[in-house]
Image (cartoon, rainbow, N blue to C red):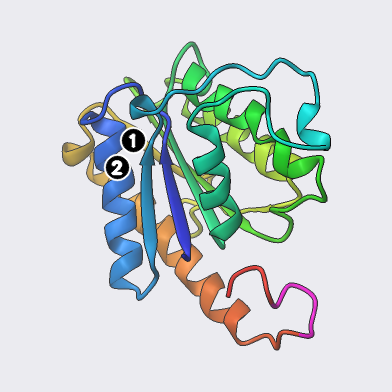
């Protein structure tokens, strides 16, 4: 799988779902394989910080094991979240915290791409901080964070209000997906024995 899209919204059919599916559709049009996960439809328990995952399975028996398998299989992780109190949702933060399991056992996401979409009620409604939270997560996992590129080139894609009516926001999604697709094309040209040549294959 090329791109794993993770929707951090508690709503299965809201603006964030629309924005993420729009992005995944553009990526599939560019020839990439994608998968979609909605955290609002999953059972995720908060991380206890016990580090049982250093040696074996997590103490929680929930849907995070499936999400971790998908994350390991993806060349790019595309996170999408509505802005809740200026940051990502609790569902997404729980997922981020629980992904420590792939960090403490050899940085299993190292070299992957990471990109973000943030949806808010106002143009300056916390989207940038939400995207920066995602970027911090990517960097903690030794991943490479991707911005949306010209002609806006901010921290990622941002949506305001109704996603299907925000043409500027949808353009940032198109820019972001073109950037991701372009990087995939370049990475696939790197032979397997070169640094960075395997993560996106």
| Residue shown at 28% from the left, 37% from the top | 17
Query: x, y (%) of residue 171?
Result: 31, 52
Residue 177 in view = yes
In the orientation shown, which residue stands out farthest toward the top?
Answer: 85
Q: State left or right for residue 88 relative to residue 39.
A: right
Badge 2 element:
helix
Per the image, the residue denoted by label 1 is 159
- For the residue pair 190 and 177, the one nearer the viewer reads as 190
Q: Of the numbered discs in the image, which one, if any, rests on residue 19?
A: 2
The answer to whether the residue labelled 1 contacts the one labelled 2, judged by CB atoms less than 8 Å apart, is yes
Q: Which residues are magenta?
A: 193-197
Query: x, y (%) of residue 46?
Result: 60, 16
Query: x, y (%) of residue 173?
Result: 36, 51
Quadrant where the C terminus is found in the figure: bottom right
How many numbered dots are placed on residues in this image? 2
- For the residue pair 159 and 81, the one nearer the viewer reads as 81
Residue 89 in view = no
Res 10 → quadrant: top left
Badge 1 element:
strand
């Amino acid at each position: 799988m090329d791109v794993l899209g993770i929707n951090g919204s508690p709503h299965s059919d809201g603006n964030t779902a629309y924005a993420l599916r729009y992005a995944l559709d553009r990526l599939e049009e560019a020839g990439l394989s994608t998968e979609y996960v909605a955290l609002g439809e999953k059972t995720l328990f908060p991380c206890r910080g016990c580090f049982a995952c250093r040696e074996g399975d997590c103490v929680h028996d929930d849907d995070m094991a499936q999400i971790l398998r998908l994350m390991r299989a993806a060349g790019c992780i595309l996170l999408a979240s509505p802005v809740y109190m200026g940051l990502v949702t609790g569902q997404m933060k729980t997922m981020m915290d629980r992904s420590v399991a792939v960090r403490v056992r050899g940085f299993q996401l190292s070299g992957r791409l990471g990109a973000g979409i943030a949806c808010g009620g106002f143009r300056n409604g916390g989207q940038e901080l939400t995207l920066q939270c995602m970027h911090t997560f990517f960097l903690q996992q030794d991943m490479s964070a991707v911005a949306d590129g010209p002609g806006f080139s901010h921290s990622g894609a941002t949506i305001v209000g109704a996603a299907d009516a925000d043409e500027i926001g949808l353009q940032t999604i198109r820019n972001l997906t073109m950037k991701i697709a372009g990087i995939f094309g370049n990475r696939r040209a790197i032979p397997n024995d070169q640094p960075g040549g395997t993560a996106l294959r």
